Amino acid sequence: MKYALVTGGSRGIGRAVCIKLAQAGNPVIINYVNNDDAARQTLAEVEALGVKGELLKFDAASPEAIEQAIDKWESEHPDDYIGILVNNAGIRKDNLMIFMQNEEWNDVLNTTLNGFFYITRRLLKGMMTKRNGRIINMASLSGLKGMPGQVNYSASKAALIGATKALAQEVAPRKITVNAVAQGLLKAI
């Protein structure tokens, strides 16, 4: 069975993506880092649609945590694979660059950009073997035009857009698509 993995899937855009994937009939793996309650709520919404859902807790900025979590998932699902990946995990630590601390820069790039790299690299083998896969990277208008007070966030999203373009060309011959979605400002409803 082909599963969809949504990083940062417990809240906000990630939750909405999980629900849309479930509505389309895809079994969904909901990744999250800390908020157990929100993750369980998203899982309940996915399962209410009659679709299999699972939680997979790991930090997208930690290559070791990613390897452990996906290895464990694969050992528990020997006949299944992750064929849809939505790289949604990301954080913001807004600050003017003159005041930006090293951690604010590194944390944002580690989650958004390095997280994309670690998770996508890990799952590409399975997609390439199956000659099928869909990778969707959640970018941002900040990555296209830049935003004051968001040098770190804008840099991470711009790099993600460039990585998307390059990877799409690398894996297209294996019938794997790679796209970026650059949403604008969102208002909570």
Image (tube, rainbow, N blue to C red):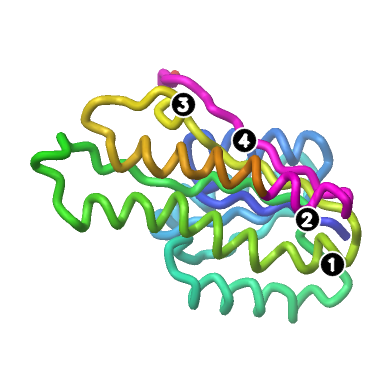
| Residue visible at 51% across and 52% down in the picture | 39
In what element is the residue under mark 3?
helix
**Mark 3, mark 2: which one is toward the viewer?**
3
Q: Please report whichever mark, 3 or 1, sits nearer to the chain's N-terminal start.
A: 1
Badge 4 amino acid: Ala
Q: Which residue is mark 3?
A: 144
Q: Please report whichever mark, 3 or 2, sits nearer to the chain's N-terminal start.
A: 2
Question: Which corner quadrant of the image does residue 5 belong to?
Answer: bottom right
Q: Is residue 119 above or below residue 9?
A: below
Q: Cα distance, mark 4 to mark 3? A: 11 Å
Count residues near mark 1 (Cα–Cα under 10 Å), then give few for <14, some for 14-19, many for 20+: some
Q: Which residue is mark 2?
A: 3
**Mark 2, mark 4: which one is toward the viewer?**
4
Contact flag, marks 3 and 2 (Cβ < 8 Å): no
Q: Which residue is mark 4?
A: 180
Question: Which corner quadrant of the image does residue 187 belong to?
Answer: top left
Q: Is residue 94 magenta?
A: no
Q: Nearer the viewer, residue 114 or 93?
A: 114
Q: Nearer the viewer, residue 118 or 3?
A: 118
Contact flag, marks 3 and 1 (Cβ < 8 Å): no
Contact flag, marks 1 and 2 (Cβ < 8 Å): yes
**Mark 4, mark 1: which one is toward the viewer?**
4
